Image: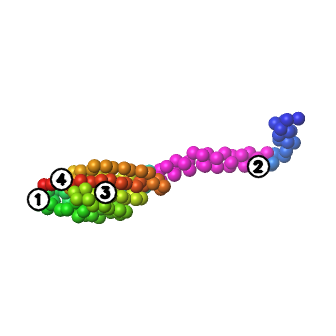
Amino acid sequence: MSAVEKGQQWWEEASQRDQLAVVICGFILAVYIVFMVVLKPLYNTQEKQTRVLSVSTKTLAKAQSLAAQIKSTQSTGGQTQGIVQVINQSLKEFELRLSNMQPNGKDVRLRIDQVPFDSVLPWVNHLEASKGLQVRDLDISADNEQGYVSVTLRLHQDSK
């Protein structure tokens, strides 16, 4: 006798109350499985997207603020600064933490560890577009934490 036949035999011999209990438990189990397999992952995805939107909104606000600062600096003529001062100021503006800096004349080699990837490219663009620095070398490698990278770059400042 197979397991299916044994199950059918038990069902036929079970009282109506036991059959009803099995049907109710089966329904509850089915609802639980649907929740765990479909609804919970959807909820988690929506929650993650909400966090991403929040970070993106903050980044946009920061970029708009920096754009306004750039325009005001350009309208007042700006001042030529040494490459180290320019880099230090921009690191503070973008709230980045420097791991290592090696100045060498008009070149500077930098290392920044555990930085959010989304902060690196706007910062590098700011250095090139607004501060007149040239990126000579750029190495970006993934960090252990998702979304974070380590950056090594060499910047150059032309004579003005």
Q: Please report whichever mark, 1 or 3, sits nearer to the chain's N-terminal start.
A: 1
Q: Give the image location of residue 67, x and y in percent.
A: 22, 55
Q: Give the image location of residue 155, x and y in percent.
A: 27, 54
Number of disc labels: 4
- Give the number of the disc on residue 21: 2
Helix, strand or loop status at disc 1: loop
**In-image side of 142 versus 90 (left or right):** right
Give the Cα separation between the discs numbered 2 and 1: 82 Å
- Secondary structure mostly taken by the magenta-highlighted segment of the chain: helix
> Callout 3, which amino acid?
Arg
Magenta-highlighted residues = 19-48
Residue at the image position 36 percent from the left and 50 percent from the top: 139
Residue at the image position 76 percent from the left and 49 percent from the top: 21
Query: Do labels 4 and 3 touch, CB within 8 Å?
Result: no
Residue named by callout 3: 109
- Give the number of the disc on residue 158: 4
Residue named by callout 1: 77
Along the line of sight, the residue nearer the viewer: 34 or 68: 68
Give the Cα separation between the discs numbered 4 and 3: 15 Å
Instruction: Quarter of the image for the N terminus: give it.
Output: top right
Q: Please report whichever mark, 2 or 1, sits nearer to the chain's N-terminal start.
A: 2
Residue at the image position 26 percent from the left and 59 percent from the top: 104
> Callout 2, which amino acid?
Ala
Helix, strand or loop status at disc 2: helix
